Amino acid sequence: MRIENWWYTAPLRLRSLFRRRRVERELEEELQFHLEHKIAEGLADGLSPREARHRAMRAMGGLEQRKEEMRDARRISWLTDFVADVGYALRSLRRTPGVTALVVVTLALGIGMTVTPFSMIDALIFRPFPVPSPEEVVTLVGTSRDGAYEPFSYREYRDIHDHTKSYAGVIANSPLRSVGFAAEPGTTPKVQGGMLVSGNYFSVLGVVPQVGRGFRADEDEVPGRDAVVVLGPDFWRRELASDPSIVGRRIRLNGSEFTVVGVAPESFQGLYIFSRPDVYVPLAMAGVFSTDPRKSFFEDRDDRELSVKARLRSTASLAAARSELAALAEDFARAYPALNRERGATVRTAFEMRTRPDQVEWKFGIIFAVLALAVLLVACTNVAGLLLARARSRAREVAVRLSLGAGRFRLVRLLLTESLVLAGLGGLGGIAIGWAAIEVLRDFSIPTELPVQVPFRLDGRMLLVALALAVLSAVVCGLAPALQTTRPDLVTGLKAADVELPGRKRLWGRNALVVAQVATSLMLLTAAYLMARSFRASVDVGVEFAHRPVLLMRLDPRLAQYDAARTARFYELLVDRARQLPGVAGAALTKSPPLGLDRFDALAFVPEGYPLPPDRDSFTAAMDTIDEGFFDTLGIPIVSGRGFLAADTAESPRVAIVNEAFARRYWPDGDAVGRRLRLDGAGGPPAEVVGVARTVKYRETTDRETEFVYLPLAQRPTARMLLLLRTSGDPLQWVEPAREIVRALEPNLPMLETRTYEDLYRYHVVEGPGVAIRLVFTMGAVGVMLAIGGLYGLVAYNVSRRTREIGIRMAIGAGPSAVLRLVMAGGLALVAIGTAIGLVMGFAVERLMNAAVFHAGGVDVVAYLVVVPTMALVTVLAAYVPARRATRIAPTLALRCE
Amino acid sequence: MSKPTDLVLGTLDLLLLKILALEPLHGWAIGLRLRSLSGDVLQVSEGSLYSALHKLEQEGWIRAEWKQTENNRRAKFYALTRPGRKQLESEAANWQRLSAAISHVVQLSEA
């Protein structure tokens, strides 16, 4: 069809589709008209009516064939054929409800198990920002020497904003993790999550508030002047009952009054995957939320807290934007060399940001998706096996059709339509299973002070994935049977319903299916077993502190407008009084405890006596700021030297404590105690290492040994700290007494987060990894079930095919055990081959998982010693049951059966 | 009876378009017109004729309409569309070029 003639052709197509009867009638009439003239012509030539009619009919070459040609000319025959095929497929499937149900359930399991990880991948990698033209939105990042991405400072953001030309707008934002919110003055503040944003944030992103307006550019110009706020949609609903007259009202954030100017639309939940901001506040109001005395947000070029994004102009290329920003970064380095050592800047797309190598979540997603596709493959091979068996019983029907002149391609299409119908039904079931699985995942709670959004969901994109998977599986599992069935030579096909197809070649396909199933499910089980084992091993050492009865309570005196001196005094009093509580064995302060939910600060340092590589001037390690009670309270042993003392004050010489891994790495030949360490880079102050602490697990229980530094709170004042209370019983019983102390010290201070260490431990060890292990194990179990079904089917099929042969063998004296051996030998050979392949694949998966997630090396022999025999036993049973039936065949019956 | 090969391959479309450019006709009349215009040299089988007509219609080059014939029967009349006229022009030009070239080659005197 020529597109340009659509004006004439489109109505024709529509007519052909929807007025089919009428079009048919007209075709009939047209040819009839011609035929009449032809007959009249014959009569005029002097023929008898009969002869004239015959001659005319001959000339027309069979009316029906002509009509068919013209139907083809309408080019919708494929569609009408398809509809007819679907009807035919449904009828034929209804005749074999058992097989149909089995196939549909199998495919539903396969597709359902695959949709779930795909929804994870979609959420973590592919889902676009919820703004118009999301592909234009890029992220600008600073780069450090080791390739990590870093945010920008306010001054740097202003320079980027003013001196780049590639963008339609440059925005900046900085998450506020705890904002004390009170609708009325005088009520105890509630903690909410917020976002500091540049004044052009909403306009550049193209987000139009559902109520009121976004910020004006002038509301972000003068620090502290314009106290305005845009509310998040959830917050508006939850805290303010969706009050439509909210614009113009005042709410209190961290004790200051803000005027509401708008409410963000439901469709816009922020640019972050896991969190939804409750309130948006202009950058100019940063003072209300950060009163860190050492830094000045608006002035210090190295106070880097802003995530910078920009909307690329349609005329600008990414490459040009990159070189522009890189040049600007060089300008920064020239103007402020001390603050920009080895620092560059680049532009990253959303996809690049989300698939950074230092993010773990998306890797998990990919691993799951690959494993799930393996399950789907097993399901497909199984279905292919079932369809193959089904196709055999239809060999006669197909042979009849072929001999009546049906084209092979047309028949293959018919059979493929059948598998498409099956896959469609399976896809529907798969969507139901996927939906249920995603609901389970969404229930999974992450213990943070703010509700964390689990972003997995079954949306249109996922339905599309399910559909694509269904079509894919239809082709994968339908093509081979369709091709094979339409090939038999006609004579044998017509002679008997169940043809003995000659040669071994025919069985090759089914054998390969079973081998593939055994191999894949073995791989899945190995993966599940390995994950479970690695997690269990990972919690054996280095997590003892998490089993202590410890209460954690997060505080931030900045929320009550405390300055540094008052903050220090507050913490001093707090810990003192907490220690006095009856039943409290120890109290301490920490900024980010091991296995906590915060990121650790990164410390740039230069170790004394350790040669620096020529191209760098410092190393980095994770660090925590603690007080002198920390090691006692958590029971982390100091292996040499001492812990921090009350005597380590701001005025005394700087001290530090490192862990064993750190000491071994930088001072391998002797005691680390007494060595010195320059803090915060080569130009920073030196600190003396006074003690070495036992290495524990810091981020995850699956961590490799992490080098870690502790610095004393007194020498590194910090506002946001966690109070740790070691108690003599259930820590939750000390929540109220601890609150009393805080309230007595400062009634306006919100308590940000209260939990036990056991909670954190459960999150790290039980819930997160537990979900992962269960997911993979379920896949493995489903895979094994499918493999058992496949193997059972194959052996049973072979037995039925060889009934006559077995009857003869038994008639001439073969015993049951000989028959058993004969029948099972084939099945066992397949299991053996499948196991061998599965071992290789399992080995590959193990390498992959160890490298990506568990940071472990080597091969886990025990895994194979457990999984392989289990698998072998199960598959042998699957072959044994039908084989046993073969031994009960009565020879006389068997000989008569054909 | 004529076979499709009686016509130079691919010229049927051109002939049909040209005939319909003169006036709208039904299928039977098109066959007659083709024969008479070509002095009984060109014939087309019913099968090829109707397939070709339906194909041209699906391409949007001709348009069908049910009308009364002179002796008051309903018949399907085909008429040229605007894209059809353009197509006719380009195919006619093409044919001129081709036939001229062929004649030129055929008429070469053998040395």
Image: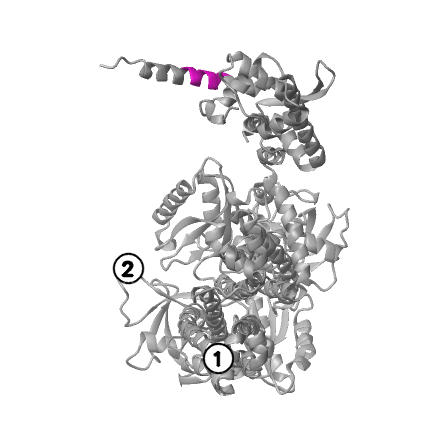
Q: What secondary structure is the magenta-colored segment mainly?
A: helix
- Foreground residue among A461 and A515: A515
The residue at the point 50 percent across, 18 percent down is: B42
The amino acid marked with disc number 2 is Asp
Q: Chain of mark 1?
A: A
What secondary structure is found at the residue carrying circle 2?
loop
Scheme by which the image is coloured: one colour
Q: Is residue A786 above or below residue A821?
A: above
Q: Is residue A515 above or below residue B67?
A: below
Q: Chain of mark 2?
A: A
Q: How many marks?
A: 2
Residue B70: image quadrant is top right
- Foreground residue among A405 and A618: A405
Specify few, some or many for label 1: CA neighbours under 10 Å numbering under 14, 14-19, or 20 or more.
many
Magenta residues span B89-96
- Foreground residue among A620 and A408: A408
* Quadrant holding the C terminus of chain A: bottom right
How far across and down, in percent of the image, does residue A236 sit? 72, 53
- Foreground residue among A880 and A407: A407
Q: Is residue B3 above or below residue A344?
A: above
Residue A556 marker? none
Residue A824 marker? 1
How far across and down, in percent of the image, does residue A667 sit? 31, 77
